[in-house]
Amino acid sequence: MNILGPQVAAAVFTDPEKADEAWAALADAGIGSAIVTDPGMLGKFELSVMVERADLERAQTVLAPLINPEDRNPGF
């Protein structure tokens, strides 16, 4: 059993349309994914695009054009 689980977040969005676009891009690339909604605090939600750990690097390459540099967390 893996405590962290078999899936990891390849990207996190606050815009549902962007999350759907990411899911479609991964599907087109043959990478299985799921969107998980985190209700967050004070009504602000996040949408995590989850992929299998083995697909993470390839998924992030596919999703890179969808990520707005201003949305990136400067702590990472």
Image (cartoon, rainbow, N blue to C red):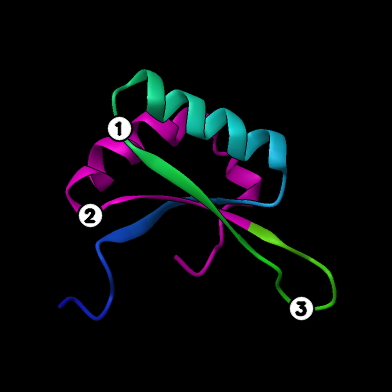
- Does 35 appear above or below 76? above
Quadrant containing the N terminus is bottom left
Q: Earlier in the sequence, mark 2 or mark 1?
A: 1
Whole-angstrom CA distance, mark 1 to mark 3, is 30 Å
Determine the residue positioned at 50% across, 70% down.
Answer: 75
Q: Amino acid at mark 3?
A: Met
Q: Earlier in the sequence, mark 2 or mark 3?
A: 3
Magenta part of the chain: 47-76
Quadrant containing the C terminus is bottom left
Q: What residue would you read off at disc 2?
A: 53
Q: Earlier in the sequence, mark 1 or mark 3?
A: 1
Please provide percent x and percent y for residue 23.
Answer: 49, 33
- Does 48 appear above or below 57? below
Q: Which mark is residue 41?
A: 3
Q: Amino acid at mark 2?
A: Arg
Q: What residue would you read off at disc 1?
A: 31
